[in-house]
Image (spheres, grey):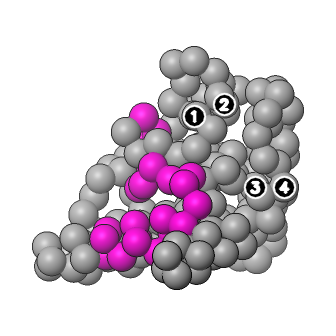
């Protein structure tokens, strides 16, 4: 499960390059948000989380929710590197019919736990997933990564 720091650094460098190539080829996207999340997403998937690329729905898996859905190119690059799908799919970001759209889609993309992107859902969605997992008696972790805009939107929404 856990890899050495040098290996994590190598993977992070690779997936950063993948994310930049994906957004450049697509002619759209948010490379900055992807690049800022690279180290933490790599560390989680390659050192901390229990996950099973060949069994993406294994009930014992830890779940990762990318609340800042616009940063999905880094999640897609990490999922490909982990073996959830072939890395050739990365070239299809934001193309019609692709499994890799502009925000994570749990129906289309193997390894994606939640369809995200709407700012402010970063608190409610993981809480609901946690509640559902806990009620099934399954011991699995849940990690959510928010961006600054998600946090601001969540605070504003609570005040309404």
CB under 8 Å between callouts 2 and 1? yes
Quadrant hosting residue 34 = bottom right
Specify which label sits upstream in the sequence, 1 or 3.
Answer: 3
46 vs 61, left or right, is right
Q: List x then y, in percent, for residue 68.
A: 62, 60
Say which element carries label 4: helix
- Where 77 sits versus 136, above or below? above
- Name the residue carrying label 1: 100
122 vs 145, left or right, is left
Q: Nearer the viewer, residue 110 or 51?
A: 110
Query: Which contiguous range is marked in magenta?
Result: 108-130
The Cα atoms of the two marked residues, 2 and 1, are separated by: 5 Å
Query: 10 Å neighbourhood of mark 3: few (<14), some, or many (≥20)?
Result: many
Say which element carries label 2: loop
The Cα atoms of the two marked residues, 2 and 4, are separated by: 16 Å
Q: Residue at x 76, y 40 (%)?
A: 29
Q: Please tell me whether the stretch drawn in magenta is mainly helix, strand or loop.
A: loop
Specify which label sits upstream in the sequence, 3 or 2.
Answer: 3
- Where 148 sits versus 31, above or below? below
Specify which label sits upstream in the sequence, 2 or 1.
Answer: 2
Pick out the residue farthest to the front: 160
Residue 88 visible here: no
The Cα atoms of the two marked residues, 4 and 3, are separated by: 5 Å
Quadrant hosting residue 19 = top right
Q: Residue at x 42, y 54 (%)?
A: 114
CB under 8 Å between callouts 3 and 2? no
124 magenta-colored: yes
CB under 8 Å between callouts 4 and 3? yes
Query: 10 Å neighbourhood of mark 1: few (<14), some, or many (≥20)?
Result: many
């Amino acid at each position: 499960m856990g890899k050495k720091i040098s290996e994590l650094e190598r993977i992070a460098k690779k997936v950063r390059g993948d994310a930049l190539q994906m957004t450049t080829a697509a002619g759209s996207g948010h490379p900055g948000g992807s690049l800022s999340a690279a180290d933490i997403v790599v560390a989680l998937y390659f050192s901390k989380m229990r996950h099973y690329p060949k069994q993406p729905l294994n009930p014992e898996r830890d779940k990762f929710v990318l609340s800042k859905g616009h940063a999905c190119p880094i999640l897609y690059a990490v999922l490909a590197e982990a073996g959830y799908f072939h890395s050739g799919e990365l070239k299809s970001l934001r193309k019609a019919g692709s499994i890799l759209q502009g925000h994570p889609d749990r129906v289309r993309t193997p390894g994606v736990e939640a369809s995200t992107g709407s700012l402010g859902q970063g608190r409610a969605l993981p809480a609901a997933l946690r509640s559902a997992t806990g009620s099934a008696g399954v011991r699995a972790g849940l990690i959510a990564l928010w961006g600054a805009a998600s946090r601001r939107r969540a605070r504003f929404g609570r005040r309404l």
